[in-house]
C-alpha cells in the first residue's frame, strides 16, 4: 500500500495481537500513516518487531487511562473482543460493553483522540436465525431477546455506544464489518483518514463518515458450500461436488440435536460436539451485505480478491500445520 498524504498522528491499536489486529498493525506500518504506532493487548504474543507493545488488562479503567496518557493517541483502532462462541455472558459484557464504555469515557476525559475506528460484526443487524439478503448499514441493531446470540447482543450494545459517542470530547467514532482479514487493513485506514480530515477541512466538502456504520466485504457473492469446497481444495483437500452426500436440513438438524444432548449428558455441558445446530443454521442460511455505502463514501475497493485470499489462507494453514509459523489466536468479531 502506498504511503498516504493523510497523517493519522499517534495511533493506538487495542487488540493488536489478535489475528485481525496483527494484519492491521502490519498495514499501518507499511502505509506509513502513523507517526507513532502502539499496541495495547492482554499479551505481547504475535508481535511485530519494531512496534511498541503494552501488555495489560484492557478491561481495567486505570490501565486504559494510563495507556492513553502515555501514548496520547490521535487515532484509536479498537479490535478487542472475546471469541464469538463464548457463552459466558459476564465475560462478554465485561469485554464488549463495559470495556468499550471505559474506553470512550477515558478517551473523552484525556482529550487526545480525534477518531475512533471500532470493529463490530455483521451479525449485529441480524437475528442470527432468518436469512440476511444484501443488507445495508441502516438496518436496526438487534438485541436480546430477538437476538439469539449473546456475543452479538453485546457487540450491538457496544456499537450503539460508540456511535452515540460521536462528537463528544472532540472525538469522532466509526465502525465496520469484516471480510478476508487482509482486506480489513485498507478500509480501517480509509475510515481513520476520513474522520481526521473532517476535523481540519470544511465538512460540506466530504461525504458523512462520522457516527456511521460501514459494511466491508469482498463484494463477491459465493454459494456457501462452493466456497468451502474451493477453500478445502486450495488447502490440499480437493473434493468433487459429485462425491458429496447431501442430506436434508431437517435430518441434519435432528442429528445435531441428538448429538448435542448426548454431549451435554456425558460432559455435563462442558464440551460441544463438532456438529451443532448453530453450525447447520449458519451453513444453510443466506447472509449477504451491500457495501455500496463504503464504496461511495470511503472509496473502498477490495484489495485482495476472494481467490487470492483463499490461496493465501491455504498457504498460512499449511505453514501452521507444518510448524513453520506459530498459529495466531485471533479474535472472532
Image (tube, rainbow, N blue to C red):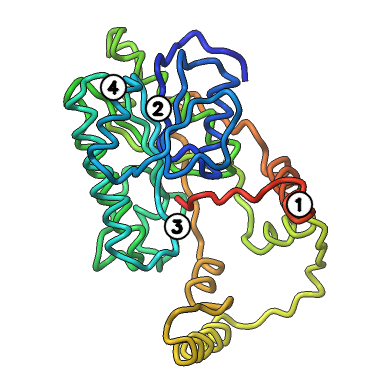
Q: Mark 2 or 3 closer to N-term?
A: 2
Looking at the image, which residue is at 24% across and 28% down? Answer: 107
- Indicate the position of residue 24 as horizontal and vertical percent values: 53, 32
Q: Mark 1 or 2 closer to N-term?
A: 2
Q: CA distance from mark 4 to mark 3?
A: 27 Å
Per the rendering, the mark at residue 12 is 2
- Camera-side mark, 4 or 1: 1
Q: Mark 2 or 4 closer to N-term?
A: 2
Q: CA distance from mark 2 to mark 4?
A: 10 Å
Q: Is residue 47 above or below residue 324?
A: above
- Camera-side mark, 1 or 2: 1
Q: Mark 4 or 1 closer to N-term?
A: 4
- How packed mark 1 is, by other alpha carbons closer than 10 Å (few <14, some 14-19, many 20 or more), is few
Q: Is residue 117 above or below residue 229?
A: above
Q: CA distance from mark 1 to mark 2?
A: 31 Å
Q: CA distance from mark 4 to mark 1?
A: 40 Å
Q: Does residue 253 appear to the left or right of 199 in the view shown?
A: right
Name the image quarter holding the N terminus: top right
Per the rendering, the mark at residue 113 is 4
Element carrying mark 1: loop
Q: Does residue 19 appear to the left or right of 306 in the view shown?
A: left
Per the rendering, the mark at residue 323 is 1
Looking at the image, which residue is at 50% across and 78% down? Answer: 272
Considering depth in this image, is 94 or 240 the residue closer to the camera? 94
- How packed mark 3 is, by other alpha carbons closer than 10 Å (few <14, some 14-19, many 20 or more), is some
- How packed mark 2 is, by other alpha carbons closer than 10 Å (few <14, some 14-19, many 20 or more), is many
Element carrying mark 2: strand
Amino acid at each position: 500500500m502506498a504511503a498516504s498524504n493523510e497523517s493519522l498522528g499517534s495511533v493506538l491499536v487495542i487488540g493488536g495481537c489478535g489475528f485481525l489486529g496483527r494484519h492491521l498493525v502490519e498495514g499501518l506500518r507499511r502505509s506509513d500513516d502513523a507517526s507513532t504506532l502502539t499496541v495495547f493487548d492482554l499479551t505481547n504474543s504475535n508481535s511485530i518487531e519494531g512496534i511498541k507493545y503494552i501488555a495489560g488488562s484492557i478491561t481495567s479503567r486505570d490501565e486504559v487511562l494510563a495507556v492513553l496518557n502515555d501514548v496520547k493517541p490521535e487515532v484509536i483502532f479498537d479490535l478487542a473482543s472475546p471469541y464469538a462462541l463464548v457463552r459466558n455472558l459476564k465475560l462478554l459484557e465485561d469485554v464488549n460493553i463495559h470495556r468499550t464504555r471505559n474506553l470512550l469515557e477515558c478517551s473523552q476525559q484525556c482529550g487526545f483522540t480525534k477518531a475512533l475506528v471500532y470493529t463490530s460484526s455483521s451479525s449485529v443487524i441480524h437475528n442470527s436465525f432468518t436469512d440476511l439478503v444484501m443488507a445495508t448499514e441502516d438496518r436496526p441493531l438487534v438485541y436480546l431477546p430477538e437476538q439469539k446470540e449473546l456475543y452479538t447482543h453485546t457487540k450491538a450494545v457496544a456499537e450503539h455506544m460508540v456511535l452515540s459517542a460521536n462528537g463528544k470530547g472532540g472525538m469522532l467514532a466509526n465502525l465496520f464489518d469484516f471480510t478476508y482479514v487482509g482486506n480489513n487493513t485498507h478500509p480501517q485506514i480509509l475510515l481513520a483518514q476520513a474522520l481526521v480530515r473532517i476535523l481540519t477541512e470544511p465538512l460540506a466538502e466530504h461525504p458523512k463518515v462520522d457516527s456511521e456504520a460501514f459494511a466491508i466485504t469482498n463484494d463477491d457473492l459465493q454459494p456457501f458450500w462452493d466456497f468451502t469446497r474451493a477453500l478445502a481444495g486450495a488447502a490440499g483437500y480437493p473434493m468433487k461436488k459429485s462425491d458429496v452426500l447431501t442430506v436434508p436440513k431437517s435430518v441434519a438438524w435432528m442429528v445435531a440435536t441428538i448429538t448435542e444432548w448426548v454431549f451435554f449428558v456425558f460432559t455435563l455441558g462442558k464440551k460441544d460436539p463438532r456438529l451443532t445446530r448453530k453450525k447447520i443454521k449458519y451453513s444453510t442460511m443466506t447472509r449477504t451485505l451491500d457495501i455500496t455505502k463504503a464504496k461511495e463514501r470511503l472509496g473502498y475497493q477490495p484489495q485482495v480478491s476472494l481467490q487470492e485470499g483463499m490461496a493465501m489462507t491455504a498457504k498460512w494453514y499449511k505453514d501452521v500445520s507444518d510448524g513453520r509459523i506459530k498459529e495466531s489466536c485471533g479474535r472472532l468479531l
